[in-house]
């Protein structure tokens, strides 16, 4: 009996250590706190993030990434990659334009069946100043950085407000919405 309890205890310890290692280095769960990524992700959704996704491959336009917010390293944000290093991002009639081509964005939150317009920072509620990344004019994404936006453009605090995300701040790629179960799907 003593041997069985010892074996069971060892199994529990190894399983717990393995689960902690997976969360620390490979896959980490996150809870969505705001509507900035609606309708792709809504407040209360839970996602899984692959922390190794960019170890062997690069970030792609359209990826939903989790990153440390450059303005407060204690906060973690979830946004969609719009501009890659060297891209020129601009706005034309409420649409995002990357390198002179309108970006197809089927994920953008819709109002009355139409995608919401994307506005520059000084047209957003509460914005009081214009920065080069505010998209009042075309903006070239610096090397080693990404321009990110929320899918709910009217409710998103994103690169238009505070600038680009350095590569070293990217934690990983969100790949699955796992809770609530009724919304379970790959991202």
Image (cartoon, rainbow, N blue to C red):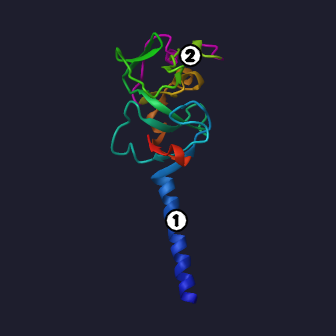
Q: Residue 105: say if magenta.
A: no
**Residues rendered magenta in the picture:** 126-144
Q: Position of residue 83 (x, y in %)?
A: 41, 25
Q: Is residue 146 visible?
A: no
Along the viewing direction, whichever of 178 and 172 lies nearer the viewer? 178
- Judged by its main secondary structure, the magenta piece is loop
Residue that numbered label 1 is attached to = 17
**Apparent side of residue 139 relative to residue 153 in the rendered image (left or right):** left
Quadrant in which residue 187 is drawn: top left
Q: Residue at x 57, y 83 (%)?
A: 5
- Label 1: state its secondary structure: helix
Q: Residue at x 53, y 21 (%)?
A: 160
Q: Is residue 30 visible?
A: yes
> Compared with residue 48, is residue 36 higher up or lower down, i.e. above or below?
above
Residue that numbered label 2 is attached to = 121
Question: Which is nearer the N-term, disc 1 or disc 2?
Answer: 1
Q: Position of residue 114 (x, y in %)?
A: 49, 19
Q: Residue at x 54, y 19 (%)?
A: 112
Q: Position of residue 147 (x, y in %)?
A: 46, 26
Determine the CA span between mark 1 and mark 2: 45 Å
- Label 2: state its secondary structure: helix
Q: Residue 131: say if magenta.
A: yes
């Amino acid at each position: 009996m003593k041997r069985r309890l010892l074996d069971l205890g060892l199994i529990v310890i190894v399983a717990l250590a393995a689960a902690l290692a997976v969360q620390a280095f490979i896959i980490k769960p996150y809870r969505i706190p705001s509507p900035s990524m609606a309708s792709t992700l809504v407040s209360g959704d839970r996602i899984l993030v692959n922390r190794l996704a960019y170890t062997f491959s690069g970030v792609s336009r359209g990826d939903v990434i989790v990153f440390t917010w450059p303005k407060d390293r204690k906060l973690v944000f979830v946004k969609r990659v719009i501009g890659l290093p060297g891209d020129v991002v601009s706005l034309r009639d409420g649409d995002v334009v990357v390198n002179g081509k309108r970006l197809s964005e089927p994920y953008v939150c819709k109002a009355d069946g139409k995608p919401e317009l994307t506005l520059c920072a000084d047209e957003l509620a509460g914005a009081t100043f214009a920065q080069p990344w505010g998209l009042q004019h075309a903006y070239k994404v610096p090397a080693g950085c990404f321009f990110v936006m929320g899918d709910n453009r009217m409710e998103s605090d994103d690169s238009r407000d505070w600038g680009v995300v350095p590569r070293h701040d990217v934690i990983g790629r969100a790949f699955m919405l796992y809770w609530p179960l009724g919304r379970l799907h790959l991202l």
